[in-house]
Image: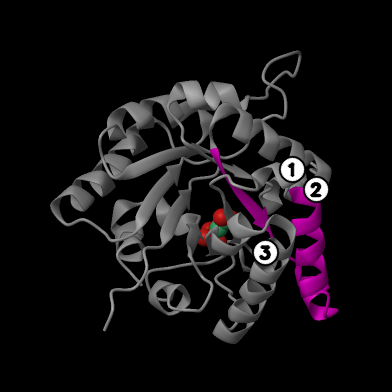
Amino acid sequence: MPAPAARFIVGNWKMNGLSAEISEAAALADSLKDEPSPHRVGLCPPATLVERMARKLAGTAVEVGGQDCHGSASGAFTGDVSAEMLKEAGASLVILGHSERRAYHNETDAEVAAKVEAALRAGLEPIICVGETLDERKAGKTLAIVRGQIAGSLPTSLSGKAFALAYEPVWAIGTGLTPTLEEIEEVHREIRAAMKAQLGASGATAPILYGGSVKPSNAADILALAEVGGALVGGASLKADDFLPIVRAG
Ligand code: PGA
């Protein structure tokens, strides 16, 4: 049997983690040094930990990312962090358009697209999130919603650039619920078609991650699906003991 293609497994710590938790990231990197994973691995801690985590993980297999960035490089935007700042702190990735940002900070597709432009300008690889709410799924609107978010959040400048798309059904995040494997596959196929039509070759090859209640118990089944190029993992990425089996799955 040919070796399965490498996936991209990214941990999203959200607003969790003080300096003591850097030890979890270090434990993850140490384990991967002893027994490397075939997959690409990233961790996105809160902005306050990016620099320390990046220093700690320098030279390891674990990449570090931010969870959001502003669309401008600098300016009078109290409380915001720019892509250039994340890059200088040692990040190589940035999650953009996460549903928690879209819901609690009213981020629109156009704002997400501007943030993607900012990430590319700074040399960060964006991980752009899309996904439907439970009401939208119940109303049969999942594919239309996801198509609309892709059309609005992915600028044409992504063409030729490294990036990832994350499909995260809002109702699956932090709930323990997931779509069926068939439903995940259906949406990922649709996302691939939309990205290809919009961005050509880069849209045909950029990994499409699944996110929403990925756990050690379901990771292998999800990662084996067609067009699932990895996972974006929240709660189960906080502890090395939970995240490692996911990083090794698939
Ligand atoms: P969860 O979060 O794995 O805790 O469901 C995923 C995410 O929001 O990225």
Residue 139 coordinates in the image, percent (x, y): 86, 79
Q: CA distance from mark 3 to mark 2?
A: 19 Å
Asked if residue 237 shows in the view, the reply is yes
Mark 2, secondary structure of its residue = helix
**35 left or right of 131?**
left
| Residue 196's disc number | 3
Residue at (79% x, 39% y) in the render: 111
Q: Quadrant of residue 18?
A: top left
In the image, what residue type sits under mark 1? Val
Q: CA distance from mark 2 to mark 1?
A: 5 Å
**238 left or right of 100?**
left
Residue 242 coordinates in the image, percent (x, y): 34, 60
Mark 1, secondary structure of its residue = helix
The residue at which mark 2 appears reads as: 109
Residue at (30% x, 59% y) in the render: 244
The boundaries of the magenta stretch are 125-153
In which of the image's four quarters is ligand 1 placed? bottom right
Asked if residue 170 shows in the view, the reply is no
